[in-house]
Amino acid sequence: MALNLNEIFSPAAIAAYWTNDPTNAQPYASDALFPARKKVSMELKWLRGHKGVGVSLKPSAFDTKATFRTRKGIQVTETNMPFFREGVHIDESDRRKIISVLATNQEFAADVINRVYDDTAQLITGARIVPERMVWQLLAPKDGKPGISIESNGVSYVYDYDPDGTWKQSNYKALTTKEKWDVPTTATPIATMTTAANAVLANTGEIITDAYMNTNTFHKMIAADEIKNRFLTVMKTTTAVLVDSEARSVVESASGIRIHLYDKMFKPEETATAEKYLPDGYVVLAPSGSLGNMYYVATPEEVDLMAGISNAQVSVVNTGVAITTKQEAHPVSTDIIASEIVLPSFERMDAVYCIKAY
């Protein structure tokens, strides 16, 4: 049976191709830390705060009024959510080539279709990069102030999640010369992480359970004499070769914190150099469970579809990424567009600590 070009270019077919590609099944760290949710309004409101360390109930005499505690004020963060959209254009010439192959060479047709899908699936991958990029700008802020800054195509989105600077003051530390992890003779990674975890516990009552870093940072950490000496003490020897798994075990058993290595990369622009989501030298300490939410809102294309006023085809993947295809009659062409409106909330930001280790 002859393949229909409109079926090949349908959003449902493109979405299915992307979903079934095993390379897209590799998890992003933000999936668990900031689970996806859908909302209606583009205005995002969320409450920043924590319960704090528990305070014992005061004793009271019978037949007396209760003593009322002073309540902490509710800190509400409110902002509008950013919009992202990009597409690929398949012109008359490309359409004719594809149709010709489909009509005359069925063996080659699958390769041609996959090439088209690969090009369009990159749009969905690009949409998936956006929220991941946002999350790590919040968790590992380069200047110590959690916020989101994305600028491209003449559009700039900037969101400050720490306008009063209190998070940077209490939840961020840039190590000094002797403390830095690239100075193995004086660095004390276990002590540094333990001190940070204790600070979070004292401030919020939350227990730090996980540490996130990339592999380069991990290797700097385990090169510290503090870790080597602790290993030798445990092994009751003066000489031993410390491998990565043993060093990891030493750190985790001494600190009570699980180590997670995260090395995923992305390109901020098509011609840019690839970057790590979690840069070298940064360590993120966090409690278990989600730290916030990743909110999506219906895009203009999805809204038009729901209202029945669009002649385009639309499918939605990853909770809120809209894939739209539109056929133009003159000149004959196909536009394939990916769009999303997305922004994270960060309710448990006070229970997160960032260390700039070197």
Image (spheres, grey):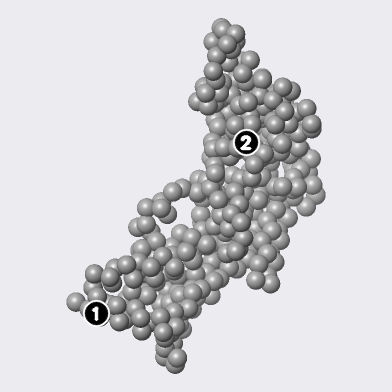
Which residue is label 1 attached to?
104
**84 sits to left or right of 28:** right
**Residue 198 seen anywhere in this rendered image of the structure:** no
User: What is the total number of numbered labels drawn onto the structure image?
Assistant: 2
Can residue 120 be seen here? yes
35 or 276: nearer the viewer: 276
For the residues carrying marks 2 and 1, which lies nearer the camera in this image? 1
Q: Is residue 355 above or below residue 119?
A: above
- Which is nearer the eye, 240 or 194? 240
Q: Is residue 138 above or below residue 226?
A: below
Along the polypeptide, which appears first: circle 2 or circle 1? 1
Q: Secondary structure at mark 2?
A: helix
Residue 317 image offset from top left, x and y in percent: 43, 63
Is residue 119 depicted above or below 168 in this figure?
below
| Quarter of the image where one finds residue 256 | top right
Pointer 2 local density, CA inside 10 Å: few below 14, some 14–19, many at least 20 = many
Is residue 232 shown left or right of residue 22?
A: right
Q: Which mark is residue 217?
A: 2
Q: Which mark is residue 254?
A: none
Q: Quadrant of the C terminus?
A: top right
Residue 205, by quadrant, is top right
- Look at the image and tell me in which quarter the N terminus lies: bottom left
Whether residues under marks 2 and 1 lie with C-beta atoms below 8 angstroms apart, the answer is: no
Q: Amino acid at mark 1?
A: Thr
Q: Residue at x 69, y 72 (%)?
A: 154
**Residue at x-position 58% and y-position 11%:** 239
Disc 1 crowd, CA 10 A, few/some/many (<14, 14-19, 20+) = few
Amino acid under disc 2? Thr
- SS under mark 1: helix
Q: Residue at x 38, y 82 (%)?
A: 95
